[in-house]
Amino acid sequence: MATENHDRTPRVVVRGGADNFKQEIIASKHHLVADEPVSAGGGDAGPDPYDYLLASLGVCTSMTVGLYARRKQFPLENIAVSLWHSRIHARDCEECETKDGMVDRIDVELELTGPLTSEQHAKLMEIAGKCPVHRTLTSEINIRLRAGEKSLAS
């Protein structure tokens, strides 16, 4: 069964000028800013796009682990998710299907504190890899790009 979104109200709107990298992000009632670091020609007014990607995965991982621990009444006290993005040679990645060129790698380090048993800790580590954003990033993604109505009128 398809779960395609036919609602024309966007979840996120990003706006920026063509003269710099700074972008305004509106997500529901939340206002955020993205930019590139000065070293990449930006003004460093906010996180860069990959920082937001990593933050999305980290937040989802933490929320998923926390929800599972609450439901199972595990004695989990705190969750810390640290993430890094890099590009590596495909030949250096044993678990990757791609063997030529470069692949993106995201390293995720999960720190769980509280009086967990080794079984509870192992289960939470397993659950961490099942958060919805993790599943999205590791599945086939179909991105449909089209011109907006206002750009057609220009």
Image (cartoon, rainbow, N blue to C red):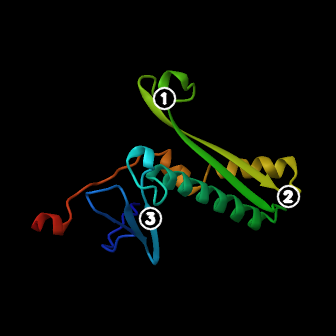
Q: Amino acid at mark 3?
A: Val
When the figure is inspected, residue 141 is found, relative to residue 114, above or below; the finding is: above
Disc number for residue 20? none
Q: Which residue is mark 2?
A: 114
Residue 29 on image: x %, y %: 46, 78
Q: Amino acid at mark 1?
A: Glu
Identify the residue at image location x=48%, y=26%: 90
Q: Amino acid at mark 2?
A: Gly
Identify the residue at image location x=60%, y=59%: 59
SS category of the residue bearing label 3:
strand
Q: Which residue is mark 1?
A: 97
Quarter of the figure that contains the C terminus: bottom left
Quarter of image, res 27: bottom left
Quarter of image, res 131: bottom right
**Real-space CA distance between mark 1 and mark 3, rounded to the nearest whole angstrom:** 35 Å
Q: Which residue is mark 3?
A: 33
Image position of 64 (left or right of 10): right
**Real-space CA distance between mark 2 and mark 1, rounded to the nearest whole angstrom:** 37 Å
Quarter of image, res 9: bottom left
SS category of the residue bearing label 1:
loop
**Real-space CA distance between mark 2 and mark 3, rounded to the nearest whole angstrom:** 35 Å
Mark 2: few/some/many CA within 10 Å (<14, 14-19, 20+): few
Disc with the residue nearer the chain's start (1 vs 3): 3
Identify the residue at image location x=55%, y=56%: 55
When the figure is inspected, residue 92 is found, relative to residue 86, above or below; the finding is: above
Quarter of the figure that contains the N terminus: bottom left
Q: Nearer the viewer, mark 2 or mark 3?
A: 3
